[in-house]
Amino acid sequence: DTVTPLKLLAIVILINLVLDPLLILGYFGFPKMGIFGAAVATVFSNIVGVVYGFYLLAKRGFYWKIRGFWDKILSFEIIKIGVPIAVNGFLFSYVYIRLTKEITNFGTTPVAALNLGHRIEGLLWPICLGFMVTTTSIIGQNLGAKNFTRVKKTAFLSAFYSSSICLVFGLVFIVFGETIAKLFTENPELLKVTASYLRIIGYFEFFLGFELTFEGAFSGIGKTFPTVLISTPLNLLRIPLAIYLVDFYGVDGIWWAIGITTFLKGIFLAIWFGKTKINFLAQ
């Protein structure tokens, strides 16, 4: 079931989008909390998503189906697949903390622009993650059925669909970035920086579809280390690359660093998966 997780993530993002202006700016009688309000909105929306997710699982009787908690073999497989993804996610978060430190050298407006840009770009993530989960599930099924031809066909077909949608979003960000930003702010400086972020990121959104889809593909075949070996170094590369590019492009250099590394991750993951011998993995 890939529709329910997509709906859950969409609900979380929607709640966040609604609460941000209410808690940051204090609209409709809500307390004006500034940046702290953005944090509260994020935490609250994620709590709602988690609680509602567990409710849906319990409603379907999933708690009766949990098995093998102390199964050593099963636990090892879960850890082997899950830990690399967790490490990559942790380092991804660290990179953005470090980039935020670099952004603050240009003042608080670019920090706000990054936050706002992420919120807007976040509308695309549920779609990409939906294709990612779908890819993982279908590839796992075909690998178990030893239908090796369909494994790679699934990955590349899903990447095509996901990236096509990302391409549309990217073009919208490039052409209408400023118009979209105006829906969230009237501050001229913040509007300018946010529009610049959306325009630059828009050039690379196509490859975001590749990145996430092939991460899901590697998870489907039970091999998550390729994702770590490619994504983690390139995520960390964003820090020195951003420091280098700001000397030429100012704060836009940070946006270019994010976009370029997204492009490289998408391309390298696709190439690696394309060269992977699927039938060997199933033996």
Image (cartoon, helix red, strand yellow):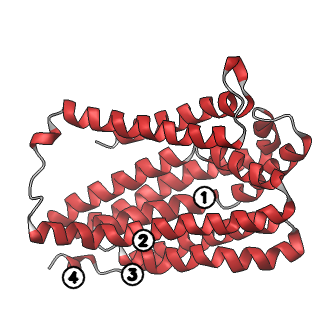
C-alpha separation, residue under disc 2 versus residue under disc 4: 26 Å
- Proximity of marks 4 and 1: CB atoms separated by less than 8 Å: no
Q: The C terminus lies in which quarter of the figure? A: bottom left
* Residue visible at 54% across and 55% down in the picture: 163
Residue type pointed to by label 1:
Phe
Disc sitting over residue 87 in the figure: 2
Judging from the image, what secondary structure is the residue with disc 2 in?
helix
Residue type pointed to by label 3:
Lys
Q: Is residue 244 above or below residue 148?
A: below
- Proximity of marks 4 and 3: CB atoms separated by less than 8 Å: no
Q: Compare marks 3 and 1 and give the one earlier in the sequence.
A: 1
Q: Is residue 3 above or below residue 130?
A: above
> Which of the two residues, 118 or 173, is positioned nearer the viewer here?
118
Q: Is residue 180 above or below residue 262?
A: above
The quarter holding residue 190 reads top right
Residue under label 3, please give it: 275
